[in-house]
Amino acid sequence: MLSDIEIAQATKPRHISEIAEKAGVPQEYLEMYGTNKAKVDYNLLKDQEHTPGKLVLVTAINPTPAGEGKTTTTVGLADALAKQGKNVVVALREPSLGPVFGRKGGATGGGYAQIVPMEDIDLHFTGDFHAIGAANNLLAAMLDNHIQQGNALGIDPRRITWRRCVDINDRQLRCIVDGLGGRANGVPREDGFDITVASEIMAVLCLATSITDLKERLSRMIVGYTYGDEPVTCGQLHAQGAMTALLKDAIKPNLVQTLEGTPAFVHGGPFANIAHGCNSVIATKMALKMGDYTVTEAGFGADLGAEKFLDIKCRAAGLTPAAVVVVATVRALKMHGGLPKKELSTEDLGALERGIPNLLRHVKNITQVYHLPCVVAVNRFPTDTDAEIDFIIKKCRELGVNTVLSTVWAEGGKGGEDLAREVVRLCDQDSSAFSYSYPLEGSIDDKINAIVQRIYGGDGISVLPAARKQIDRLTALGFGNLPVCMAKTQYSFSDDAAKLGAPEHFTVTIRNVKVSAGAGFIVALTGDIMTMPGLPKVPAAERIDVDENGVITGLF
C-alpha cells in the first residue's frame, strides 16, 4: 500500500496558471511560487464582481488515535462536487510545522483525497508562518528594547503578556528567564515561547479583511501593562507599520490544487484547541467569490473548530454556512466507547453504542443550537461491518439527519459522490434560521457558561481566583462585549482529555483569561491546555528523510 506522500508524489499536478484559470482568478492577480503554487492578490476581492457561492463547513467528532479523516473528507467532497459538474473551490488551513515533526495529522488530506504539493504545504510552503513568527518576535524585541531604553511608557516587566514564538514543538521554551548577564543584555525577567500558530498575529491575519484592517488590528494588540495597571498596545510602541511590512505577502491567500485538479486556497489558521482554528476570512471570501460551492473545514472536533468558526469567524465576517458535514468513523466511535485501539477492527456494537453519543451531541449542536442543515459522513474502513454502519444510520435518522458513507481516501472524488449529492440537497434548503450559541451582550462569564452548557453539555464553570481578577479587569477595560475563544483539550467535550464519549455533570475550570484585542476576542484557558506543545517520545522527525535527488520520504 502506498503512503500518502508516495501517492502525492506519483501525481503530476497541473500548472498553477491552469488551476487559477479554472478558479476564475485573472493572471494579473497571480504571483507564482514555482509551477505548482501561487499567491493571489487580495485586491481581487474588491476588483471582481461575483455572486458569493454556498459555504459548506466540514467538522468532526472529537479526535481519537483511531483517526476521523476530516481534511480527507473535505478534499474528497470538493472533488466529488467537481465530478458532478459543480464549480467548487476548497478553503483549507495551512499545517503548522511543529506537529509535522512531532505527531503529524492529516493536514493535507490522505490517500487519494489530498492537496498538493503535499510536502511543500507541510513544510515551508510560501513562508506565511515564518512571516508571522518574524512579526511576533519583532514586537517582542521592540517591547524589551523600549524598557531597556528608558521605559517611557512605564511598562511593568512583571506584567508583560506578549511572548515570543517559534513554529516547532519545544517544551524547553515554555518558561525561560532572559535578559541575564548585566545591563547591556536587557532587563532580566520571566519570559516564554508559544508555538507560532498560537500567536495573536495568526488570529489577526486570519480575521483581517484587508491590509489596512490588518495594520489596525496589529496596533490594538495588548503587549503588557504599566505600573499604573493600564494596558500597553503595539501601536504605542509604533511597531504596527514594520510588522505589516513583514506580513504584506503573508496576508495573500495561497492557491494550490487537489490531486484531481480542484482549486484550493490554503491560508492560515491551525490549532483550534489553543487558537480559533479557521483559515483566513480573505481566503474563504475569495473561494466564495470564485466558486458556486466553497468547502472549508475548522480545526479538531465540532466543539472547538466548528464552535469558533460559527461564533467567532462567521460573526466577524458575516458568513452563513449553507450546510455542515460532521465526519465520524466507526473505529473512533468505538474508541469513544472505551474499546482499546488494538481491538477496533472487531465488530463491537456495545462499544459503538457507548461511543455514539459523542457524534449525536455534535449533530444536535449543529441542528438545534446553530440551526443549520447537517449530514453525517462516515469515513468507511474495510473492517466496518454492515451492522455497525446501520446502527449509526439509525441513530442519526432519529435526529432527522442523514448518514452517508464516504470512501474518498481510497477512491478520491468518486468515493464522495453520494455525500456530494446530499450536500447539494442541503444547500438548497433554507439556512436563514442560523443563530449563534451566545449573544455578545452578555458578560464574559455568561458567554463561557453558554459554550460549556449548550455546546459541551457540562453543568457550568469553575473560575479560579486569578482568572476572576482577569475577567473583572477586562470587563472594566471595556472588553466584556467580545466573543470568547476557548482554549481546551480537543479530545473531550470536557476539559479532561480522559473523559471520552459524551460526558455529563462536569464543570470546566477556567484558570486564565486574556484579551486578544487585535483579533477581537477573549481567550479562556481551561484545564491544563498549553500554548507550546512538546515532542512525543518518538517524534515524526525521526522518520523523515530526503534522498540525493531531493525526494522527501517519511512525511506522513
Image: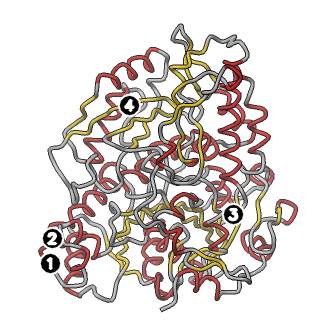
Whether residue 20 sits left or right of residue 262 in the image: it is right
Tell me the kind of residue under disc 2: Glu
Q: CA distance from mark 2 to mark 1?
A: 6 Å
Tell me the kind of residue under disc 1: Leu
Vertical order, 191 against 226 (above or below): below
Q: Which mark is residue 349?
A: 1
Q: CA distance from mark 2 to mark 3?
A: 42 Å
Discs 4, 3 touching: Cβ within 8 Å: no
Judge depth for marks 1 and 4 and give the one in front.
4
Nearest to N terminus: mark 4 or mark 3? 3
Nearest to N terminus: mark 2 or mark 3? 3
10 Å crowding of disc 1: few (<14), some (14-19), many (20+): some
- State the image quarter where residue 258 is shown: bottom right
Discs 2, 4 touching: Cβ within 8 Å: no
Can residue 292 be seen here? The reply is no
Nearest to N terminus: mark 3 or mark 1? 3
Tell me the kind of residue under disc 4: Asn
Q: Which mark is residue 125?
A: 3
Whether residue 419 sits left or right of residue 161 in the image: it is left
Vertical order, 85 against 66 (above or below): below
10 Å crowding of disc 3: few (<14), some (14-19), many (20+): many
Q: CA distance from mark 3 to mark 1?
A: 43 Å
Judge depth for marks 3 and 1 and give the one in front.
3
Q: Which mark is residue 353?
A: 2
Across and down, in percent, residue 123 comes to 64, 65
Discs 2, 1 touching: Cβ within 8 Å: yes
Disc 3 element: loop
Q: Which of the two residues, 441 or 115, is positioned nearer the viewer here?
A: 115
Q: Which residue is mark 4?
A: 512
Across and down, in percent, residue 243 comes to 74, 37
